Image (cartoon, rainbow, N blue to C red):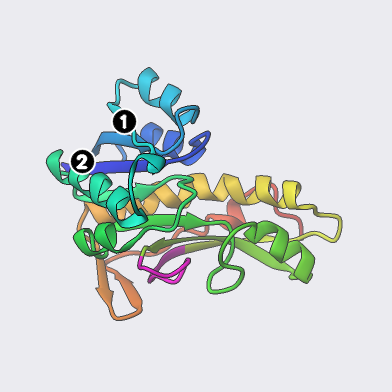
Amino acid sequence: MLKIGVLASGRGSNFQAIIDEIEAGKIPAKIEILIVDNPNAYAIERAKKHGISYLYINPREFPSKEAFYEKIRDELIARGVELVILAGFMRIVKKPLVDAFQNRIMNIHPALLPSFPGLHGQKQAVDYGVRISGCTVHFVDEGVDTGPIIIQAAVPVHPEDTEETLSERILRLEHKIFPEAIRLFAEGRLKVEGRKVKILNYNLPEISFSNPEIRQ
């Protein structure tokens, strides 16, 4: 069974979606630890409710960002974590963690990468006037949302959309494709070749098109 470590900073809605899929028996995995950089993160309450161990690590207690990530790395390794999930973790992951978990750190971004990386991907999409946006699950490297893409799902952008309305539409798909990517990893069906991630023996479900929110 795959051992997962989750990093979060806020409410942890994707964390909850992953918990739900694991508890439903759809992902052969166990969450070993939740690590937060914010003592008030609501993700902690979710961990408590489901009996998941959690740890607050204060980045201000470390002399450098690298030292902060060395501490996170050591905590994850001590628990035998095999896959690291960034569930709303609002920091750029640094070399000590990336090197220790190469192609074993997953993040979800609320845009169709490589378009609109970084903060406020939904606002960027609305401001740019695109007709389609969505979300991307990708492996994490040392760049900002530049790692190999695993799964993407698309939603329409309506003329009247705001950052908030588009964010809500995208979030529904995040809760579907993030657990799906983790399931594929747990089943050994992801193979990274350079920038590309091959999914073995898989037909991607038409997640976006079955969403009742989509209007033609």
Q: Residue at x 41, y 41 (%)?
A: 60
Q: Position of residue 211 (x, y in %)?
A: 62, 49
Q: Earlier in the sequence, mark 1 or mark 2?
A: 1
Which quadrant holds residue 142?
A: bottom left
How far apart, in angstroms, are the residues tagged by discs 1 and 2?
Answer: 9 Å
Q: Residue at x 15, y 46 (%)?
A: 77
Kindly identify the amino acid type of the residue bearing the numbered disc 1. Leu
Q: Position of residue 185 (x, y in %)?
A: 26, 56
Predominant secondary structure, magenta span: loop
Q: Which residue is more in the foreground, 68 or 11?
A: 68
Mark 2 surroundings within 10 Å by alpha-carbon count, few (fewer than 14), some (14 through 19), many (20 or more) = some
Query: Residue 75 — which label?
Result: 2
Q: Which residue is more in the foreground, 114 or 131?
A: 114
How many labels were placed on the picture? 2
Q: Are marks 1 and 2 in contact (CB under 8 Å)?
A: yes
Query: Residue 161 — which label?
Result: none
Instruction: Please indicate whether residue 69 sits to the left or right of residue 109 in the image.
Output: left
Q: Which residue is more in the foreground, 182 or 128?
A: 128
Instruction: Please indicate whether residue 130 sits to the left or right of residue 6 in the image.
Output: right
Q: Residue at x 67, y 45 (%)?
A: 168
Does the image show residue 104?
A: no
Residue interval drawn in magenta: 141-151
**Mark 1, residue position:** 55
User: Is 149 included in the stretch rendered in magenta?
Assistant: yes
Q: Position of residue 197 (x, y in %)?
A: 33, 72
Give the residue at the far right of this rendering: 160
Q: Residue at x 74, y 69 (%)?
A: 131
Does the image show residue 62?
A: yes
Q: Is residue 34 above or below residue 198?
A: above
